[in-house]
Image (cartoon, rainbow, N blue to C red):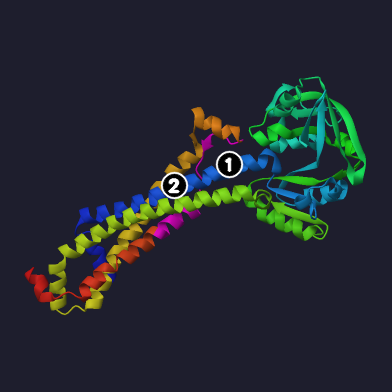
Amino acid sequence: MLFKMAWRNIWRNRRRTFITAASILFAVLFASFMDSLQRGAWDNMINNVVNYYFGYVQVHQDGYWEEQSIDKAFPLADSLEQVSAVEGVEAVLPRLESFALAAAGETTSGVLVAGILPNVENKMTDLENRLVEGEYLTEGDEAVLVASGVAEKLGLSLGDTLVLISQGYRGVNAAGKYPIKGIAKFGSPDLNKQMVYLPLPAAQYFYGAPGLATSLALKLGGQEDIKPVVAALRTQLDTSAYEVMDWEELLPDLVQARELDTAGNVIVYFILYMIIAFGIFGTILMMSKEREYEFGVLISIGLQRWQLALSVWVEVILLGVLGALFGILLSMPIVYYFKVNPIRFGGEMASSLEKFGFEPIFPATFDMQIFMTQALYVFILTAVLALYPIFKIRKLQPVQAMRG
């Protein structure tokens, strides 16, 4: 009976109903759009950074990431087969990484030498498309691919010889000279100043580490595969010998930057919800004032105060449900449009993003959880504001209300 009365009361004043429902609708719409755009932008940035070099998951010998010494290299054959068999792993990128002193004439510079399988590496990092001069490596090459910053600092060009000197596996002397087959340019200034690539067999020979690798970077289908793959690897591999790390452990600075940005958005959401709260409360306040005479009459003819208060509270809740529902339905196609057609930046903004290896686009994330969460927040806010008529009815004096 109370529900039926509340439903009828909603449509007695259609203008008020539409205003209140529209306030809730736009609250859900704006909050969902902001959240989807923020998550989509960060997912895209993380994908750019992670697939730029690191991969979503890496496998090393236990303790390697803290020390990053070539003496922490491990046999490649056994581990490669185990890791490749895990569901969700699309490609495994074995690498032998260590630092070396690069020399050309009288000029020297510290570089990071990465021994790679060229074809496999290209599947994730798209290294071949970063070439600005020369040709991409093949597995049997005895040549190097250098970053443009390294080439510029050492005064090298295509076809010149690069001398590398380092300490190899377990203290062996590592020295070699290699022709430059290609020059690549990276958006990240750090990578551009230090990267030198060798085919994996040549790097293993250079460091005296035949059949060894320092890391396995994994290409996955998407971020949703990270936790299952990490859990499976930690179950199948000997965790006393190997460490399995996801991108959040590999790049804690990026995680902190995302958390800081999210914390900043909380303030924006708070301001948005406060604006919406005042809008909804204003409508409820107006409704309560307009219906004082009605409330006085109903109480005078015997309707219990709690029944009247519950009926009015249900009215507002129904408005909240309608507004939240239509807010979800309206926000879904808008968010999906910006997922398919992401916001693209140009000019200086695009240049600054590309400088750090980010695509200058902001796609939206289409996730039902976002819509449902924002709708729930707005619904709870509406339910709390709907308590005002209850306190109003409790203190209402029927005679004064009817006179007014």
Give the camera-side residue of 249 and 37: 249
User: Residue 196, position in %: x, y?
Assistant: 77, 32
Residue 228 falls left or right of residue 277: right
Crowd tier of the residue under label 1, counting other residues whose Cα lies within 10 Å: few below 14, some 14–19, many 20 or above: many
Q: Does the magenta stretch include residue 57?
A: no
Q: What residue type is labelled 2?
A: Met
Q: Please report the bounds of the magenta region as a residue range.
A: 357-377
Q: Is residue 367 visible?
A: no
Q: Which residue is drawn at 70% across and 28% down?
A: 149
User: Residue 243, position in %: x, y?
Assistant: 77, 55
Residue pointed to by mark 1: 45
Q: What residue type is labelled 1?
A: Met
Tell me which corner region of the image, top left, top right, bottom left or bottom right, holds residue 206: top right
Q: Can residue 270 be seen in this view?
A: yes
Tell me: residue 399, above or below residue 374.
below
Counting every numbered tag in the picture gives 2
Image quarter (top left, top right, bottom left or bottom right) of the N terminus: bottom left
Q: Residue at x 71, y 58 (%)?
A: 231
Residue pointed to by mark 2: 34
Earlier-in-chain disc, 1 versus 2: 2
Q: Residue at x 45, y 54 (%)?
A: 266
User: Residue 302, position in %: x, y?
Assistant: 16, 80
